[in-house]
Image (spheres, coloured by chain):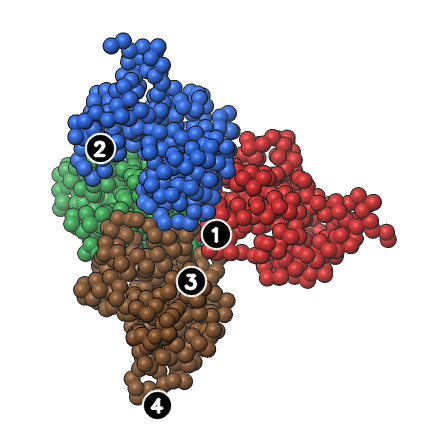
Chain colours: A blue, B red, C brown, D green
């Protein structure tokens, strides 16, 4: 098989960064920012603070990475991983606040918010909850018409994004096992998260070149993401992300931001 | 004495609004927004939340009021009234974050941040502290060149603002007693805050027409503000603000925003 | 009908107090504390702060009122009114933290936490959710064996409380309409909350004397609370609470704390 | 030189633990808890949360360590390292709240708060500020008469503690350079913090046996702490703490809690 850039495959690598708070840190942001093409920057509601945001934006601007608003529930103690049953208008305003805050900081560093990626429980909720999804979409649209928003393929959030004239960006997860119906295997299963760098890299290459991945039952299913999410918050995460990028480039896949 | 708009006197009336948080409210925002010309909107660090900010911006946009970023220390329990000894770069980033968040919300309502007014302990600190003042000025300048910033006449903050190419806006306080040297009488004095609406209105008219006010020792001192701050957080505050505006207009002073 | 204290009817009047935060206030605590017998004191997670807690405890101690821990989700922006899908052990620890903090403050004023009353979304959730209810009960039991906990008659929380050796205290709501099955009419219905002081007082007297109330469909249903909750956060709330107490005493019902 | 426990020297080793927040962690608590005798547990105002507090208390109870309340300013974004100019009564109530919350959690694990150690900017402030020191002392006394409180030798906080009938515990810092007047060399100096485990251990042994330490100018000064603080928040911190304990025991110094 000839694998060259003449294939035209292009993939974006996104990762969560800036997820510390004050003195507390998560992951190796500086290493990740040397590998990924799109930086999902926490905006202060579930993680992140103004100085961390500014540092990430500065590095992203220097390296030419896309800056995305990683918006979440207002829940620092829970890191945005807990569903909150909140009113749609309040959620919309909270999301708008976060995007705008990051955009102002990004502009001070010569870049700007190029996309939105909801975080944690909010991400999962708007994959299926029409009400909260509509609130998030309304906020993104109020901030800027046409803005890209990342989400699960087939999710309510991406459907509503398309209907609202935003740019839906379906993404896959590099280190997650998939069900035969192209869903993510829930985290409570022991095999839900992959840890082998070589295996993860090979799966991402297959996603990019073939548009498929092997599901938990051994079947080969269609997964054709425009972006692949690599995690940054575990030991060895940056090394895995580096392996993924190297394997993609070796396979002739162009690694570049959706929103460049 | 002929008092007409041919005098050319113009005064801005500013007031703090949007200083509630969640279910908690302060002052009668909707009444004040019918009287003032510039709305200092709390941005979520010492008071205010995204939904409150959006409501105020909506009303301000409809009424054609200027929207200002009322930035403060990150201190909801202390309402931004407690000095915090924080690093300059962190303060600058915190201020930028707040301005940007409000600006994004304002834009969703068809307006934008037209000026900055620091709040509480931050306002008082940067009247004399070079380090924190420089941090605030750097943040405002990073957000937008030339942006107006309100402050005490003679303060470090206004001096540095001028040097940085921002637009310093000296302001007076409608209901505060002045020392013979044009400073504010400290709040611990019983007569530091005036409560008589008629007296307050007459003083503001004198400030606007004559550029003077009677100090605590009976002397007449020079106070020529471009804007006058009326308070909104006490019972009867909106009534006093209304009296001030009516008296100004009766005296032929044009009441309009600095930043319109 | 002879209505005298020889009937032996005894009722407790409880109300939420200390629900401000910093400069923000809710309701007229000092008026309510002159009427009720049990003070549900917010503990800082959804409302309340250490100084407000101390003030309420001081007044409660002087007046001989019972102090209860009004525990809630950690959600100041949402006032604890939003369900949070949190892990049971984290919820238990959060509840224990709140009770303990209040107890220490109460002891500094010569009293102590005499009962627990969950707040808002937590109250409603543990009326039916076994997992969160068990977490709350475990926390209360870990704090003190046998402690009373208030709740809806028939709720999961009261059932588990009884099973755990705590003291379940079924309560009624003075100003809420009831369904024919003794549930509360949801707030979205226009008639869900009663506002007429005389009517409210009469209903509470009927609850205390007859153990019944007239439901929304006109039927008379059994409601035999040990405590009645009067609200404190609306204009006129203290006046209504005063009417309720006066009517109870006029009817010969003894008004005293469950936990005195 | 014969170094045996017949010397009678006894030293306490204290360290800050439980300083994470939600998903964020600082230091290797579990390793430290195997070395130290007194655990300064963050109480949620500048760091720490209920679940982290409970875990630390559980381990401390099992191992027989003393549990101390590491109280601080309410400043999660600043980790309590920023001075806040707050009113004395509010500070006292905030401190009482924190001690009480930890005590309740400790009791659920079969232990209790045995001492108080203020943190960061609060620790430094009350070493010289009479007003804030008095507030902290009042809070500790309100919580429990006679309770030990750690501080700098010669500090205002320890003086007021003694006057109030509390138990002042002067402490030294294992890894900090001292001035000739027995003060700590400010952190901005390159040599302010020592990193060599062997050197640190030898200094602590000298403190315990001889009651002296070599100051920055080479002079030998008197430092006779009842407790020595070992840091836990840097890489290798637990290893250094382990070296200190091993050296003390090898030198015949008894390592045990002040408050056991």
Q: Report the residue marked by disc 4.
A: C1
Q: Is residue D226 left or right of residue D252?
A: right
**SS label for mark 4:** loop
Q: Report the residue marked by disc 1.
A: B21
In the orientation shown, which residue stands out farthest toward the right? B1
Q: Chain letter of disc 4?
A: C
Q: Report the residue marked by disc 3.
A: C189
Q: Which one is in front in this view, the residue at disc 1 or the one at disc 3?
A: 3
* Residue at the spot 35% in from the left edge and 21% down from the top edge: A11
Give B2 or C208, whichever is nearer the viewer. C208
Density class for disc 3 (Cα within 10 Å; few <14, some 14-19, many ≥20) is: few
Question: Label 4 to label 1, Cα distance in Å?
Answer: 51 Å
* Residue at the spot 23% in from the left edge and 20% down from the top edge: A202
Image marks 2 and 3: residues in contact by CB distance under 8 Å: no
Measured as percent of width and height from the top left, residue D148 is found at: 29, 55
Q: Chain letter of disc 2?
A: A
Q: Is residue D199 above or below residue A247?
A: below
Measured as percent of width and height from the top left, residue D36 is found at: 21, 43
Q: Residue A179: which disc?
A: 2
Same chain check for tags 1 and 2: no
* Residue at the spot 29% in from the left edge and 32% down from the top edge: A233
Q: In which quarter of the image is residue D239?
A: top left
Question: Label 2 to label 3, Cα distance in Å?
Answer: 44 Å
Q: In this view, does C252 lie above or below C140?
A: below
Image marks 1 and 2: residues in contact by CB distance under 8 Å: no
Among numbered discs 4 and 3, the one appearing first in the sequence? 4
Quadrant that contains the N terminus of chain D: top left
* Residue at the spot 54% in from the left edge and 48% down from the top edge: B55
Q: In this view, does C201 lie to the left or right of B234?
A: left
**SS label for mark 3:** loop
């Amino acid at each position: 098989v000839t694998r060259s850039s003449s294939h035209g495959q292009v993939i974006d690598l996104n990762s969560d960064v800036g997820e510390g708070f004050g003195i507390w840190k998560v992951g190796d942001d500086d290493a990740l920012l040397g590998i990924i093409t799109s930086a999902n920057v926490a905006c202060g509601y579930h993680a992140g603070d103004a100085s961390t945001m500014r540092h990430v934006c500065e590095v992203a601007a220097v390296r030419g990475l896309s800056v995305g608003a990683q918006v979440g529930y207002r829940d620092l103690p829970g890191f945005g991983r807990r569903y909150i049953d909140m009113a749609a208008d309040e959620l919309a305003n909270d999301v708008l606040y976060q995007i705008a805050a990051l955009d102002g900081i990004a502009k001070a560093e010569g870049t700007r918010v190029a996309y939105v990626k909801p975080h944690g429980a909010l991400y999962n909720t708007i994959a299926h909850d029409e009400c909260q999804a509509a609130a998030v979409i309304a906020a993104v649209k109020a901030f800027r018409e046409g803005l890209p928003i990342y989400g699960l393929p087939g999710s309510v959030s991406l459907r509503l994004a398309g209907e609202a004239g935003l740019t839906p960006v379906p993404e896959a997860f590099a280190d997650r096992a998939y069900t035969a119906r192209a869903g993510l295997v829930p985290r409570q299963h022991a095999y839900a998260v992959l840890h082998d760098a070589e295996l993860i890299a090979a799966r991402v290459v297959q996603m990019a070149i073939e548009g498929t991945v092997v599901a938990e039952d051994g079947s080969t299913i269609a997964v054709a993401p425009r972006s692949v999410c690599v995690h940054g918050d575990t030991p060895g995460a940056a090394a895995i992300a580096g392996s993924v990028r190297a394997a993609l480039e070796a396979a002739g896949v162009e690694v570049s931001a959706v929103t460049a």
